[in-house]
Amino acid sequence: MISNRVKSLSAYKTEVRPASVRLSSNEFPYDFPEDIKAKILEEVNKIPLNKYPDPEAKELKEVIADFFGVKGENVILGNGSDELIYYISMAIGELYLPVYIPIPTFPMYEISAKVLGRTIVSVPLQKDFDIDLNGSLEKIREEKPVLGYFAYPNNPTGNLFSREKIEKIRDEGVFCVIDEAYYHYSGKTFLEDALNREDTVLLRTLSKIGMASLRVGVLIGKEEIVRELSKVRLPFNITYPSQIIAKVILTEGRNFLEEKIKEIIKEREKVYKEMKRIEGVEVFPSSANFLLFRTPFSAQKVYEKLLRRDVLVRDVSYLPGLNRCLRVSVGKPHENDRFLEALDESIKELKESKTTRF
Ligand SMILES: *Cc1c(COP(=O)(O)O)cnc(C)c1O
Protein backbone atom coordinates (compact mmCIF):
# COMPACT_ATOMS: atom_id res chain seq x y z
CA MET A 1 0.00 0.00 0.00
CA ILE A 2 3.02 2.29 0.24
CA SER A 3 3.04 4.71 -2.70
CA ASN A 4 5.73 4.56 -5.35
CA ARG A 5 6.39 8.19 -4.48
CA VAL A 6 7.51 7.12 -1.03
CA LYS A 7 9.12 3.84 -2.11
CA SER A 8 11.48 5.72 -4.39
CA LEU A 9 12.82 7.86 -1.53
CA SER A 10 15.81 7.02 0.59
CA ALA A 11 15.71 7.90 4.29
CA TYR A 12 17.71 10.91 5.46
CA LYS A 13 20.92 9.67 7.03
CA THR A 14 23.07 11.23 9.71
CA GLU A 15 26.34 10.19 11.36
CA VAL A 16 25.84 7.85 14.30
CA ARG A 17 29.30 6.32 14.70
CA PRO A 18 30.89 7.10 18.06
CA ALA A 19 33.92 9.43 18.28
CA SER A 20 35.13 11.87 20.90
CA VAL A 21 35.65 14.73 18.42
CA ARG A 22 32.35 15.01 16.52
CA LEU A 23 32.55 17.43 13.63
CA SER A 24 29.97 15.90 11.33
CA SER A 25 26.68 17.75 11.86
CA ASN A 26 27.53 21.47 11.92
CA GLU A 27 26.38 21.71 15.50
CA PHE A 28 27.33 24.60 17.77
CA PRO A 29 30.27 23.26 19.78
CA TYR A 30 29.28 24.85 23.10
CA ASP A 31 26.58 24.03 25.60
CA PHE A 32 25.26 26.99 27.64
CA PRO A 33 26.86 28.15 30.90
CA GLU A 34 25.69 26.94 34.31
CA ASP A 35 23.72 30.06 35.26
CA ILE A 36 21.64 29.87 32.10
CA LYS A 37 21.14 26.13 32.55
CA ALA A 38 19.97 26.75 36.12
CA LYS A 39 17.47 29.34 34.93
CA ILE A 40 16.21 26.90 32.27
CA LEU A 41 15.74 24.19 34.89
CA GLU A 42 13.75 26.55 37.04
CA GLU A 43 11.47 27.55 34.15
CA VAL A 44 11.05 24.00 32.87
CA ASN A 45 10.03 22.93 36.34
CA LYS A 46 7.02 25.23 36.11
CA ILE A 47 5.66 23.67 32.91
CA PRO A 48 2.31 21.92 33.40
CA LEU A 49 3.25 18.75 31.52
CA ASN A 50 -0.39 17.69 31.20
CA LYS A 51 -1.30 20.81 29.23
CA TYR A 52 -0.93 21.63 25.55
CA PRO A 53 1.51 24.43 24.80
CA ASP A 54 0.44 27.77 23.32
CA PRO A 55 -0.54 26.69 19.78
CA GLU A 56 0.89 29.90 18.33
CA ALA A 57 3.99 30.03 20.54
CA LYS A 58 3.26 33.76 20.78
CA GLU A 59 5.78 34.71 23.42
CA LEU A 60 8.63 32.82 21.80
CA LYS A 61 7.65 34.22 18.42
CA GLU A 62 7.97 37.78 19.77
CA VAL A 63 11.37 37.01 21.29
CA ILE A 64 12.58 35.45 18.03
CA ALA A 65 11.18 38.30 15.95
CA ASP A 66 13.06 40.74 18.15
CA PHE A 67 16.22 38.62 17.95
CA PHE A 68 16.13 38.75 14.14
CA GLY A 69 14.99 42.39 13.99
CA VAL A 70 11.53 41.77 12.49
CA LYS A 71 7.91 41.77 13.70
CA GLY A 72 5.88 38.81 14.96
CA GLU A 73 3.54 39.15 11.94
CA ASN A 74 6.47 38.34 9.69
CA VAL A 75 7.31 35.05 11.43
CA ILE A 76 6.18 31.42 11.36
CA LEU A 77 7.88 28.98 13.70
CA GLY A 78 8.48 25.36 12.72
CA ASN A 79 9.68 22.18 14.36
CA GLY A 80 13.08 22.91 12.86
CA SER A 81 13.31 24.56 9.46
CA ASP A 82 12.82 21.05 8.09
CA GLU A 83 9.13 21.31 8.95
CA LEU A 84 8.92 24.75 7.33
CA ILE A 85 10.48 23.35 4.17
CA TYR A 86 7.61 20.82 4.05
CA TYR A 87 5.06 23.60 4.51
CA ILE A 88 6.57 25.65 1.70
CA SER A 89 6.69 22.67 -0.64
CA MET A 90 3.00 22.05 0.13
CA ALA A 91 1.81 25.62 -0.18
CA ILE A 92 3.75 27.32 -2.96
CA GLY A 93 2.53 26.55 -6.49
CA GLU A 94 0.28 23.71 -7.58
CA LEU A 95 1.76 20.31 -6.76
CA TYR A 96 2.04 19.35 -10.44
CA LEU A 97 4.41 22.27 -10.99
CA PRO A 98 8.14 21.58 -10.48
CA VAL A 99 10.63 22.75 -7.88
CA TYR A 100 14.02 24.18 -8.87
CA ILE A 101 17.08 23.16 -6.84
CA PRO A 102 20.75 23.85 -7.56
CA ILE A 103 22.72 20.73 -6.53
CA PRO A 104 24.49 19.58 -4.41
CA THR A 105 22.60 21.17 -1.53
CA PHE A 106 20.64 20.46 1.65
CA PRO A 107 18.66 17.22 1.04
CA MET A 108 15.34 18.25 2.64
CA TYR A 109 14.33 20.45 -0.30
CA GLU A 110 14.25 17.50 -2.63
CA ILE A 111 12.79 15.05 -0.10
CA SER A 112 9.88 17.35 0.82
CA ALA A 113 9.03 18.01 -2.83
CA LYS A 114 9.22 14.35 -3.82
CA VAL A 115 7.05 13.21 -0.92
CA LEU A 116 4.37 15.48 -2.34
CA GLY A 117 4.84 14.06 -5.81
CA ARG A 118 6.44 17.21 -7.20
CA THR A 119 9.03 16.97 -9.92
CA ILE A 120 12.47 18.44 -9.38
CA VAL A 121 14.42 20.61 -11.78
CA SER A 122 17.95 20.16 -10.47
CA VAL A 123 20.86 21.99 -12.02
CA PRO A 124 24.45 21.12 -11.03
CA LEU A 125 26.52 23.98 -9.62
CA GLN A 126 29.55 25.29 -11.50
CA LYS A 127 33.04 24.11 -10.58
CA ASP A 128 33.34 27.10 -8.22
CA PHE A 129 30.04 26.01 -6.59
CA ASP A 130 28.15 29.09 -7.77
CA ILE A 131 24.86 28.68 -9.64
CA ASP A 132 25.10 27.82 -13.33
CA LEU A 133 22.85 30.65 -14.48
CA ASN A 134 22.65 29.83 -18.18
CA GLY A 135 22.04 26.15 -17.50
CA SER A 136 19.40 27.11 -14.95
CA LEU A 137 17.57 29.61 -17.15
CA GLU A 138 17.47 27.12 -20.00
CA LYS A 139 15.90 24.42 -17.80
CA ILE A 140 13.59 26.89 -16.05
CA ARG A 141 12.19 28.13 -19.37
CA GLU A 142 11.70 24.55 -20.51
CA GLU A 143 10.19 23.01 -17.36
CA LYS A 144 8.66 26.06 -15.64
CA PRO A 145 9.37 25.44 -11.95
CA VAL A 146 7.48 27.82 -9.65
CA LEU A 147 9.45 27.33 -6.45
CA GLY A 148 13.21 27.38 -5.85
CA TYR A 149 15.36 26.61 -2.82
CA PHE A 150 18.66 28.38 -2.20
CA ALA A 151 20.78 27.57 0.83
CA TYR A 152 22.60 30.85 1.48
CA PRO A 153 25.38 29.95 2.29
CA ASN A 154 25.04 26.55 0.68
CA ASN A 155 25.43 23.29 2.57
CA PRO A 156 27.72 21.35 2.04
CA THR A 157 29.82 23.67 -0.15
CA GLY A 158 29.93 26.63 2.31
CA ASN A 159 29.80 29.42 -0.30
CA LEU A 160 27.25 32.16 -0.92
CA PHE A 161 25.67 32.04 -4.38
CA SER A 162 25.79 35.33 -6.29
CA ARG A 163 22.82 37.40 -5.37
CA GLU A 164 22.34 38.58 -8.98
CA LYS A 165 21.95 35.00 -10.17
CA ILE A 166 19.23 34.30 -7.61
CA GLU A 167 17.52 37.53 -8.67
CA LYS A 168 17.65 36.54 -12.33
CA ILE A 169 16.08 33.19 -11.50
CA ARG A 170 13.40 34.96 -9.47
CA ASP A 171 12.71 37.20 -12.47
CA GLU A 172 11.57 34.05 -14.30
CA GLY A 173 8.65 33.70 -11.88
CA VAL A 174 10.31 31.33 -9.41
CA PHE A 175 9.24 31.86 -5.77
CA CYS A 176 12.55 31.97 -3.88
CA VAL A 177 13.20 30.37 -0.51
CA ILE A 178 16.46 31.72 0.87
CA ASP A 179 17.62 29.30 3.55
CA GLU A 180 19.85 31.32 5.87
CA ALA A 181 20.52 28.54 8.39
CA TYR A 182 24.10 29.82 8.70
CA TYR A 183 23.21 33.52 8.75
CA HIS A 184 25.17 34.15 11.95
CA TYR A 185 28.36 32.93 10.28
CA SER A 186 27.87 34.76 6.98
CA GLY A 187 26.23 38.06 7.95
CA LYS A 188 24.64 38.11 4.48
CA THR A 189 20.89 38.19 4.01
CA PHE A 190 17.88 38.66 1.73
CA LEU A 191 15.88 40.06 4.65
CA GLU A 192 14.75 43.25 2.90
CA ASP A 193 13.44 41.25 -0.05
CA ALA A 194 11.63 38.82 2.23
CA LEU A 195 9.90 41.66 4.08
CA ASN A 196 8.90 43.56 0.97
CA ARG A 197 8.22 41.04 -1.78
CA GLU A 198 5.62 38.34 -2.29
CA ASP A 199 8.01 36.02 -4.11
CA THR A 200 10.72 35.64 -1.47
CA VAL A 201 10.85 34.14 2.03
CA LEU A 202 13.74 33.42 4.38
CA LEU A 203 14.44 30.47 6.57
CA ARG A 204 16.50 30.80 9.72
CA THR A 205 16.97 28.30 12.54
CA LEU A 206 18.13 28.06 16.13
CA SER A 207 19.86 24.75 15.30
CA LYS A 208 23.22 26.18 14.26
CA ILE A 209 23.45 28.58 17.20
CA GLY A 210 23.37 26.14 20.07
CA MET A 211 19.78 24.95 20.15
CA ALA A 212 19.68 21.98 17.75
CA SER A 213 18.03 19.93 20.51
CA LEU A 214 15.01 22.24 20.67
CA ARG A 215 13.97 21.97 16.99
CA VAL A 216 12.97 25.54 16.32
CA GLY A 217 13.04 26.86 12.76
CA VAL A 218 11.96 30.32 11.64
CA LEU A 219 10.29 31.47 8.45
CA ILE A 220 10.40 35.21 7.73
CA GLY A 221 8.24 36.79 5.07
CA LYS A 222 5.81 39.52 4.16
CA GLU A 223 2.72 39.56 6.37
CA GLU A 224 0.38 38.49 3.53
CA ILE A 225 2.56 35.51 2.67
CA VAL A 226 3.01 34.53 6.30
CA ARG A 227 -0.76 34.62 6.83
CA GLU A 228 -1.36 32.21 3.93
CA LEU A 229 1.50 29.86 4.78
CA SER A 230 0.33 29.72 8.40
CA LYS A 231 -2.79 27.85 7.27
CA VAL A 232 -0.77 24.67 6.68
CA ARG A 233 1.09 24.81 9.99
CA LEU A 234 0.18 22.08 12.46
CA PRO A 235 -1.09 23.43 15.78
CA PHE A 236 1.23 22.88 18.75
CA ASN A 237 4.21 22.28 16.45
CA ILE A 238 6.60 23.88 18.94
CA THR A 239 6.69 21.85 22.16
CA TYR A 240 6.16 23.50 25.52
CA PRO A 241 9.74 22.82 26.70
CA SER A 242 11.16 24.21 23.45
CA GLN A 243 9.11 27.38 23.76
CA ILE A 244 10.27 27.90 27.34
CA ILE A 245 13.94 27.01 26.85
CA ALA A 246 14.44 29.00 23.65
CA LYS A 247 12.89 32.02 25.33
CA VAL A 248 15.34 31.85 28.24
CA ILE A 249 18.34 31.40 25.97
CA LEU A 250 17.42 34.18 23.56
CA THR A 251 16.89 36.63 26.39
CA GLU A 252 19.60 35.69 28.90
CA GLY A 253 22.11 34.00 26.59
CA ARG A 254 22.55 36.62 23.88
CA ASN A 255 25.97 37.85 24.99
CA PHE A 256 27.23 34.32 25.35
CA LEU A 257 25.97 33.45 21.86
CA GLU A 258 27.48 36.52 20.25
CA GLU A 259 30.85 35.91 21.83
CA LYS A 260 30.95 32.25 20.81
CA ILE A 261 29.79 32.94 17.26
CA LYS A 262 32.68 35.39 16.86
CA GLU A 263 35.06 32.76 18.17
CA ILE A 264 33.73 30.13 15.75
CA ILE A 265 34.21 32.49 12.81
CA LYS A 266 37.77 33.14 13.95
CA GLU A 267 38.39 29.41 14.30
CA ARG A 268 36.94 28.78 10.84
CA GLU A 269 39.55 31.11 9.34
CA LYS A 270 42.30 29.48 11.40
CA VAL A 271 41.31 25.95 10.35
CA TYR A 272 41.01 27.10 6.73
CA LYS A 273 44.56 28.51 6.77
CA GLU A 274 45.99 25.45 8.50
CA MET A 275 44.27 23.04 6.10
CA LYS A 276 45.70 24.95 3.15
CA ARG A 277 49.15 24.18 4.50
CA ILE A 278 48.59 20.42 4.37
CA GLU A 279 50.02 19.26 1.08
CA GLY A 280 47.42 17.68 -1.18
CA VAL A 281 44.43 19.10 0.69
CA GLU A 282 42.22 21.50 -1.25
CA VAL A 283 39.99 23.45 1.12
CA PHE A 284 37.18 25.72 -0.07
CA PRO A 285 36.40 29.13 1.47
CA SER A 286 33.32 29.10 3.71
CA SER A 287 30.73 31.56 5.01
CA ALA A 288 29.26 28.95 7.35
CA ASN A 289 30.40 27.02 10.42
CA PHE A 290 31.94 24.18 8.40
CA LEU A 291 34.53 23.65 5.69
CA LEU A 292 34.42 21.51 2.56
CA PHE A 293 37.68 19.91 1.44
CA ARG A 294 39.04 17.54 -1.15
CA THR A 295 42.07 15.26 -0.99
CA PRO A 296 43.81 13.13 -3.63
CA PHE A 297 42.52 9.98 -1.86
CA SER A 298 39.15 8.29 -1.62
CA ALA A 299 36.93 10.14 0.84
CA GLN A 300 35.95 6.86 2.46
CA LYS A 301 39.63 6.16 3.26
CA VAL A 302 40.21 9.63 4.68
CA TYR A 303 37.02 9.29 6.72
CA GLU A 304 38.17 5.95 8.19
CA LYS A 305 41.68 7.22 8.96
CA LEU A 306 40.21 10.21 10.79
CA LEU A 307 37.76 8.01 12.68
CA ARG A 308 40.61 5.77 13.80
CA ARG A 309 42.03 8.94 15.37
CA ASP A 310 38.66 9.51 17.07
CA VAL A 311 37.58 12.38 14.80
CA LEU A 312 34.23 12.17 13.01
CA VAL A 313 33.57 14.21 9.85
CA ARG A 314 31.01 13.87 7.04
CA ASP A 315 31.81 12.05 3.82
CA VAL A 316 29.96 14.01 1.12
CA SER A 317 31.72 12.43 -1.84
CA TYR A 318 28.51 10.68 -3.02
CA LEU A 319 27.00 14.05 -3.96
CA PRO A 320 27.19 15.32 -7.55
CA GLY A 321 30.39 17.27 -8.22
CA LEU A 322 31.91 16.41 -4.85
CA ASN A 323 34.27 13.55 -5.74
CA ARG A 324 36.75 12.87 -2.92
CA CYS A 325 35.18 15.62 -0.77
CA LEU A 326 34.48 15.67 2.96
CA ARG A 327 32.89 18.26 5.22
CA VAL A 328 34.16 19.21 8.66
CA SER A 329 32.32 21.39 11.17
CA VAL A 330 34.18 24.06 13.12
CA GLY A 331 34.40 22.94 16.75
CA LYS A 332 36.05 24.20 19.90
CA PRO A 333 39.69 25.28 19.43
CA HIS A 334 41.11 22.06 20.89
CA GLU A 335 38.76 19.93 18.75
CA ASN A 336 39.86 21.79 15.65
CA ASP A 337 43.49 21.21 16.59
CA ARG A 338 42.80 17.50 17.08
CA PHE A 339 41.17 17.41 13.63
CA LEU A 340 44.05 19.26 11.95
CA GLU A 341 46.61 16.94 13.48
CA ALA A 342 44.57 13.85 12.55
CA LEU A 343 44.11 15.08 8.99
CA ASP A 344 47.81 15.80 8.58
CA GLU A 345 48.72 12.32 9.85
CA SER A 346 46.02 10.61 7.77
CA ILE A 347 47.13 12.26 4.56
CA LYS A 348 50.78 11.36 5.27
CA GLU A 349 49.80 7.73 5.89
CA LEU A 350 47.75 7.55 2.72
CA LYS A 351 50.62 9.02 0.70
CA GLU A 352 53.01 6.43 2.10
CA SER A 353 50.72 3.50 1.39
CA LYS A 354 50.43 4.79 -2.15
CA THR A 355 54.19 5.02 -2.74
CA THR A 356 54.97 1.63 -1.17
CA ARG A 357 52.51 -0.06 -3.51
CA PHE A 358 54.68 0.80 -6.54
C1 LIG B 1 21.32 22.56 9.27
C2 LIG B 1 20.50 23.15 8.21
C3 LIG B 1 19.17 23.47 8.44
C4 LIG B 1 18.60 23.26 9.81
O1 LIG B 1 17.45 22.55 9.85
P1 LIG B 1 16.66 22.49 11.23
O2 LIG B 1 15.52 21.61 10.85
O3 LIG B 1 16.25 23.88 11.57
O4 LIG B 1 17.55 21.89 12.24
C5 LIG B 1 18.42 24.05 7.43
N1 LIG B 1 18.99 24.32 6.24
C6 LIG B 1 20.27 24.05 5.97
C7 LIG B 1 20.86 24.41 4.68
C8 LIG B 1 21.06 23.44 6.96
O5 LIG B 1 22.33 23.14 6.69
Image: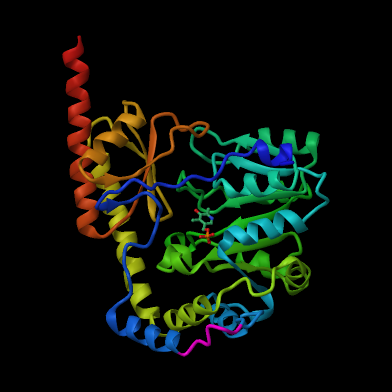
Determine which quarter of the picture holds residue 152: bottom right
Residue at 53% across, 69% down: 216
Determine which quarter of the picture holds residue 218: bottom right
Nearest the camera: 216 or 135?
216
Against 309, residue 25 (above or below) is below
Whether residue 184 is visible to the viewer of this picture, yes or no, is no
Q: Main secondary structure of the magenta part?
A: loop
Q: Taking 292 as reference, is 227 left or right? A: right
Against 246, residue 85 (above or below) is above
The image shows residue 124 at horizontal and vertical percentages of: 59, 34
Q: Is residue 352 magenta?
A: no
Nearest the camera: 257 or 309?
309
Range of residues picked out in magenta: 46-51
Q: If the image is split into quadrants, where does the C terminus sit?
A: top left
Residue at 59% across, 79% down: 61
Against 283, residue 26 (above or below) is below
Q: Taking 233 as reference, is 155 left or right? A: left
